[in-house]
Image: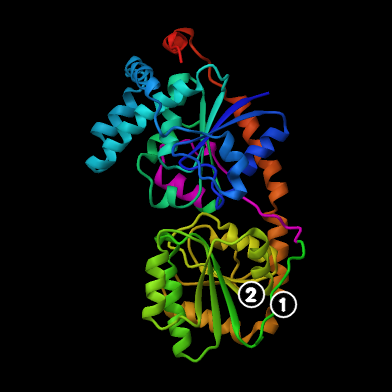
Amino acid sequence: MSHIAYIANQFPAAVEPYVWEEVQELRRRGHTIRCYSVHSPKLERETQRFAEETVGLFPIRLALILPATMLLLWNVATLRDCLRRILARGDESIFVRARALLHTWLGAYYAVLLKGKGVEHLHAHHGYSASWVAMVAARILRTGFSLTLHGSDLLIHHSYLDTKLANCTFCLTVSEFNRNHIVRCYPNVNADKIIVQRLGVETSMTDAPSFPRDDESILLILSVGRLHRVKNHEFLIQGCRELKSLGLRFFCIIVGEGPEHITLERLIRKLDLEEEVKLFGQVPRQRLDSYYSICDLVVLTSRSEGLPLVLMEAMAHGRTVLAPEITGIPELVIPGKTGFLYAPDSLEDFVAKVKTVSLARNALAPMRRAARRHVVQYFNRSTNLSAFAELFLSRIYSSTPEKPAHENSLLQQIQL
């Protein structure tokens, strides 16, 4: 059975359940999975068990600074191409280059943490800094390295992704759009190691307590997601202002928490939408299921996405969905068949689609049923997790690198 190390910038996170679901699936098959987080794990109710077992790279252990530095210096020749990429190639800023050097040292530090653990493969979720840390540690330890790419880590925050893709044993990504983007933008990377592995959601819906609606004629809109700029809730709120000016009767619930909370509250007040738009913060899973069960429309207004779980969940609940026509979303939301798409950044098109849903609510039952069938068939969590584990393990077994004995001699001498 394999010993695998999982690492992410922040693990566990309640908004990214797919990471610990993968860990659980691999463990169910008898494999040892050790979890690491670049930053200290968040202590959230849903993820407490995983947080307790996860090792954070920060805060740095003082006793390991010297061993990690010695290990990095010992492997300068091994890491020559990575260091050359940081210092002499690309158009990254000085700040980004400095961070990459720090993350290179963190890779050596990570290798020291993994000493004696019997880890045979390192996997990084997302293409952010944790993937560079894992890549460096894997190079030092002479183990396999893989990563999963989702959305923003591929399309927005993609510093040094060329090097990560060149060095990975294989790369999983969540949509055909992502794979095509990688193959097109990184032509020197072997396309055979870029694999689409879809995420999934629970499709056996259980009855959740619902809340009475005083007026069924009011369009109930639900938005679920982190209050972060990439989710573009400002666009949603501006859209609500247009809907109000057109006389549409609606109520919009925004579920989620994040750094944009205060900014969004101010915008709601500025646009005189206190009665129509409410920020509900983070809510428990059962309560969220209740919101899904009573809403008329679930909207997503992100600037960038992978393949959103929120839309999958809404469709599994048989809800009508509206999202921007970007990235891999059309693989999930087929216009006119399983939901609605609007032209990116077009407030006019967004408002028009919301009005269409409002006027045709009763006639959209066939679309809602088709949406649920689509998720059950292609985005079923149980089915896709099983397929992930089989694919992941087969790739590890087929590409385990040999370890030259002399390469780890310094690691063997380090006393923790």
Residue at the spot 44% in from the left edge and 84% down from the top edge: 242
How far across and how far down the image is residue 112, in percent?
A: 45, 20
Magenta stretch contains residue 223: no
SS type, badge 2? loop
Residue at the spot 58% in from the left edge and 19% down from the top edge: 118
Image quadrant assignment for residue 249: bottom right
Question: In the displayed structure, would residue 69 be above or below residue 189?
Answer: above
Span of residues in magenta:
178-205
- Give left or right: position of 415 versus 322: left
Question: In the displayed structure, would residue 79 be above or below residue 242?
Answer: above
How far across and how far down the image is residue 386, in percent?
A: 71, 42
Q: Residues within 10 Å of mark 1 (few under 14, many from 20)?
A: some
- Residue 301 in view in this figure: yes
Q: Amino acid at mark 1?
A: Ala
Q: Amino acid at mark 2?
A: Cys
**Viewer-side residue, 330 vs 284:** 284
Question: In the displayed structure, would residue 416 be above or below residue 190?
Answer: above
Magenta stretch contains residue 194: yes
- Give left or right: position of 370 versus 162: right
- Residue 167 in view in this figure: no
- The residue labelled by disc 1 is 365
Q: Residue furthest bottom?
A: 247
Colouring:
rainbow
Quadrant where the image shows the N terminus: top right
**Viewer-side residue, 404 vs 179:** 404
How far across and how far down the image is residue 277, in percent?
A: 49, 77
Q: CA distance from mark 1 to mark 2?
A: 14 Å
- The residue labelled by disc 2 is 295
Residue at the spot 40% in from the left edge and 21% down from the top edge: 64
